[in-house]
Image: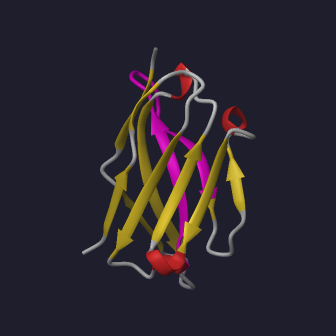
Amino acid sequence: QVQLVESGGGLVQPGGSLRLSCAGSGIIFSMYTMGWYRQAPGKQRELVAAITNGGSTSYADSVKGRFTISRDNAKNTVYLQMNSLNPEDAGVYYCNARRVNFLGIKNEYWGQGTQVTVSS
């Protein structure tokens, strides 16, 4: 049974920081591209950051220079360090694991989400 469990969300003031964690189980974690998505009320879920199994990272333009994604394969965990948070960063943050095997079959899993609120 695959599980992705997020933690670290909460309420933070504008300009503050949070660190999200996502612990995976039931998959060979190191083989997966891991991503963080967020969904604000009334908006579509959007990709915030991703890190490949090789360690290459990518970010949404809106978070470049403020957010950092990293992974620790020994702990089956991916992190999202979020700095200089603003109200537009608020939403439910979801952890995602995906890979395409040699047959071209895509495996994808989602966590349950963790709420991030940015407010004074």
In magenta stretch: residue 83: no
Residue at 40%, 47% in the rendered image:
8
Residue 21 percent location from the top left of the image: 44, 56
Residue at 73%, 40% in the rendered image:
64
Q: Quadrant of residue 96?
A: bottom left
Residue 106 percent location from the top left of the image: 48, 70
Residue 36 percent location from the top left of the image: 51, 50
Q: Which residues are magenta?
A: 31-50
Task: Tell me if residue 16 comes above or below residue 109 in the rendering.
Answer: above
Q: Residue furthest top?
A: 120
Q: How is the image coloured?
A: secondary structure
Q: Quadrant of the N terminus?
A: bottom left
| Depth order, front residue of 108/22 | 22
Residue at 46%, 49% in the rendered image:
20
Residue 68 percent location from the top left of the image: 65, 50
Q: Residue furthest bottom?
A: 102
Task: Tell me if residue 113 comes above or below residue 117 in the rendering.
Answer: below
Q: How many marks?
A: 0
In magenta stretch: residue 49: yes
Residue at 67%, 37% in the rendered image:
63
Residue 70 falls left or right of residue 110: right
Q: Principal SS element in the magenta part?
A: strand
Task: Tell me if residue 19 comes above or below residue 96 in the rendering.
Answer: above
